[in-house]
Image: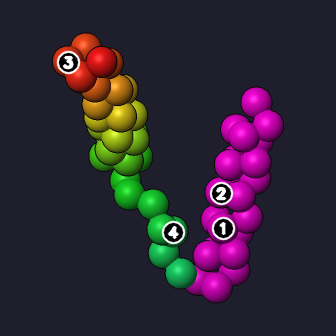
Amino acid sequence: MADIILALAAGAIVGILFSLLKLPLPAPPVLSGIAGIAGIYLGGVGYQWIIERFFS
């Protein structure tokens, strides 16, 4: 839970800093960002499954 709170705080600080400097936010559009995060997670889980299933 502490990791989630720290990540949220870091994201909020970056968002505030970029807004103060009048820069575009360093984040993809919402739907494609969520899809990218889900893809990264599923790829990591899939890799672990393949290693355990076929190489253990």
Q: Position of residue 47 (x, y in %)?
A: 29, 31
Q: Which residue is mark 4?
A: 25
Q: Nearer the viewer, mark 1 or mark 4?
A: 1
Q: Nearer the viewer, residue 17 or 22?
A: 17
Mark 4 and mark 2 lie on one chain; the one further toward the N terminus is 2
- The amino acid pointed to by label 2 is Gly
Distance of label 4 from label 2 (alpha carbons): 10 Å
Mark seen at residue 11 = 2
Q: Which residue is mark 3?
A: 54
Q: From which residue to which does the magenta span run?
A: 1-22
**SS label for mark 3:** helix
Pointer 1 with pointer 2, Cβ within 8 A: yes
Q: How is the image coloured?
A: rainbow
Q: Nearer the viewer, residue 1 or 20?
A: 1
**SS label for mark 4:** loop
Taking the view exactly as shown, the residue that stands out farthest to the left is 54
- The amino acid pointed to by label 3 is Phe
Q: Which residue is mark 1?
A: 14
Figure quadrant of the C terminus: top left
Instruction: Identify the residue at image location x=28%, y=25%.
Output: 51
- The amino acid pointed to by label 4 is Leu
Location of residue 42 (image quadrant): top left
Q: Is residue 49 visible?
A: no
